[in-house]
Image: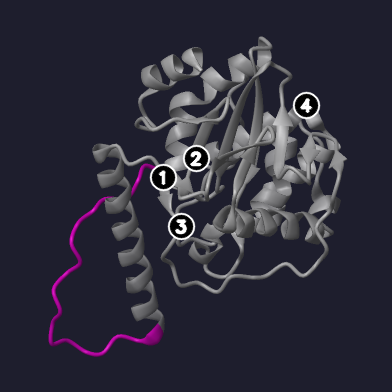
Amino acid sequence: MRSTPAVLRPGTELPGTGRPAPETSGPETSGTERSGVRRHGMRALGAAVIALALVAGTAACSLVGGNSPVPVATATAPTGTDGAVNFDGGYIQTGTGSKHVDIWFDPMCPICGEFEKANGETLAKAVSDGTITLRLHPLTFLDRASNGTGYSTRASAALTCVAVKEPNGALDYYTALFANQPEENSNGLTNEELAKLATDNGLTDITDCLGRSGPYQAWAQANTAHSQTGPIVVDDKKVLDTIQGTPTVLVNGTQFAGKVTDAAAFTSFLAKH
């Protein structure tokens, strides 16, 4: 069993879904105050959408929406393989089992966080006992929901840094990212916090790697672009036209369509495919 990941700060529950206060005839608010109200409203709306999605069984974060500026990586993406990363295949690999599990995820996607919370231990055990090969496909579409900091890209690059420098620690760092997952429409973790997340969990220091992670950022953004143009190929076979949302989870090329929080259903699906 994997150890419980270190958490940088106390976990927070999803915010409430109360309606915004009605307009009044009071004085005009400042630009800063209006911006704060908008951010609070966006977070409350996001929480409401998440809650509805989980109740309805929707299994993915939408790939559309959001209006924050998105930093574009200009470096050249790496090719080939390095450590646990298959740059050409677009994934980070952990485990060596004959059954292949592929997960397309965004580090800021709250539904991905719910999937990890419900099923992470099952996947980690299957990696540890040699049942599965787990392939993690980082995406960055929620950069638009991190106030211009490009959190999804930076977190994906941080995971790539760990996977290159300490391949056996990639899954632990992936787990820690979701244990410390920021809210949508927040700045996300800083690079210093992303580096500390690694050392706090007994992993390699990625500070220097993050400082020169432009190629890894470009790779994650290229993965995201490809996810929208397709085709999605797994083990030399086309399995999907495009990625419609995250998490997208495939077991031996077959997509899991159940509720992300239904651990029993996913465990059964994993055993059958």
The three-letter code of the residue at mark 4 reads Asn
For badge 3, the amino acid type reads Leu
Q: Which mark is residue 240?
A: none
**Residue marked by disc 3:** 63
Q: CA distance from mark 1 to mark 2?
A: 7 Å
- How far apart are the two marked residues, 3 and 2, measured between alpha carbons? 12 Å
Q: Residue at x 72, y 51 (%)?
A: 157
Q: Please, which residue is most extreme toward the front here?
A: 237
- The residue nearer to you, when weighing 197 against 259, is 259
Q: In the image, which residues are magenta?
A: 12-31
Under tag 1, what secondary structure?
Answer: loop
The front one of 255 and 179 is 255
Kindly check if marks 1 and 2 are in contact, taking CB atoms under 8 A apart as contact: yes
- Residue under numbered circle 1: 60
Which secondary structure dominates the residues rendered in magenta? loop
Q: What is the distance, in whole Å, between disc 4 and disc 2 at their CAs?
A: 23 Å
Whichever of labels 4 and 2 marks the residue nearer the N terminus, that label is: 4
Amino acid carrying label 2: it is: Thr
**Residue 190, can we see it?**
no
